[in-house]
């Protein structure tokens, strides 16, 4: 298999704290430094959240703007993907940073259960977020927590709400949502290829100990892989991950195992149909 593999690093998320792992980057300077290390290790997409000083999640566009500026300076060419996830804000505040015109933004197109709550993505909010992304030239990454989310993305593409062919990420291992099930995973791949074309790129993310499992499944199946401290703070049950870069290097090793080159930033942009870096 010779297709390059894109590695996405989810650098901090909304939940992990220093108490969970001291390597979790919270401040903007910590996030920029951690992402630069991950970029140098092989990651070419940075999935970004921002935090307040007390480590709580934020949707402040000014924080996102500062983070985006820092990443573009210190990680030239890296794809900046901002999160519109529901843990960081409510309603349209979740998309307040889309006017910054990042390369990409996450888009959850349906609701599902999370460990202690319902992850709410009502249709009117989904439609508005998709419209904002279209207006500002931001490519959505579809976060599929369920099969219905892949089908919904296809309908939105057919209806013109999503301009480019959707890039779908399978998220597995969230408690009370879709577990890491290999038969379901393989069906997801077949569904993406049936709906979006045999050459449609896709990605997979696993939560907690499922991270390395999904990394292996994705790399060996021709997809792209997400890793990072947002989803998992450990190398194994007894060892904390020392950095985002350490988790990226695990995926790089898998790429070597399955004879897949690690995509450069330029290759990643070509695969995803993104504009050239500024």
Image (cartoon, rainbow, N blue to C red):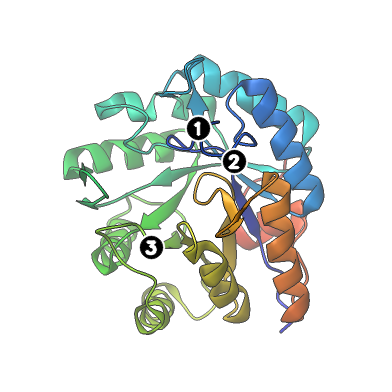
- Seen in the picture, residue 193 relative to 157 is either above or below; the reply is below
Q: Which comes sooner in the sequence, label 1 or label 3?
A: 1
Mark 3 or mark 2: which comes first in sequence?
2
Q: Dot 1 surroundings within 10 Å: few (below 14), some, or many (20 or more)?
A: many
Residue drawn 47% across the image and 62% down it: 206
The residue under label 1 is 17
Q: Which residue carries the number 3 mark?
A: 173
Residue 57 position in % (x across, y down): 42, 26
Residue 80 image position (x, y, % from top left):
61, 39
Q: Earlier in the sequence, mark 1 or mark 2?
A: 2
Label 3, residues with CA under 10 Å away: few <14, some 14-19, many ≥20: many
Mark 1–mark 2 distance (CA, rounded to whole Å):
12 Å
Residue 11's tag is 2
Does any portion of residue 224 appear in the rendered image?
A: yes
Q: Nearer the viewer, mark 1 or mark 2?
A: 1
In this orientation, which residue lies closer to the viewer: 49 or 239? 239
Query: Circle 2: is it few (<14), some (14-19), or many (20+) Cα within 10 Å?
Result: many
């Amino acid at each position: 298999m010779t297709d390059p593999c894109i590695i996405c690093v989810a650098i901090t998320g909304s939940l992990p704290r220093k108490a969970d792992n001291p390597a979790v980057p919270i401040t903007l300077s910590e996030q920029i430094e951690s992402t630069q290390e991950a970029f140098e290790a092989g990651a070419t997409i940075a999935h970004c959240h921002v935090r307040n000083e007390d480590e709580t999640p934020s949707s402040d566009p000014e924080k996102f703007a500062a983070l985006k500026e820092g990443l573009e300076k210190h990680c030239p060419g890296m794809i900046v993907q901002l999160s519109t996830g529901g843990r960081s804000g409510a309603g349209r505040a979740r998309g307040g940073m889309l006017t910054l015109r990042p390369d990409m933004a996450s888009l959850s197109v349906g609701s599902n259960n999370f460990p202690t709550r319902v992850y709410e993505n009502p249709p009117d909010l989904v439609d508005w977020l998709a419209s904002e992304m279209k207006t500002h030239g931001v490519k959505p990454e579809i976060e599929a927590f369920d099969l219905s989310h892949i089908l919904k993305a296809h309908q939105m593409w057919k209806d013109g709400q999503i301009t480019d062919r959707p890039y779908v990420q399978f998220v597995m291992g969230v408690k009370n949502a879709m577990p890491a099930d290999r038969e379901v995973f393989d069906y997801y791949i077949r569904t993406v290829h049936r709906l979006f074309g045999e050459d449609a790129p896709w990605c997979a993310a696993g939560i907690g100990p499922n991270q390395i499992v999904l990394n292996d499944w994705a790399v060996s199946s021709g997809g792209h892989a997400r890793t990072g401290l947002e989803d998992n703070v450990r190398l194994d049950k007894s060892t904390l991950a020392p950095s985002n870069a350490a988790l990226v290097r695990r995926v790089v090793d898998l790429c070597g195992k399955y004879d897949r080159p690690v995509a450069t930033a330029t290759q990643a942009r070509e695969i995803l149909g993104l504009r050239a870096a500024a």
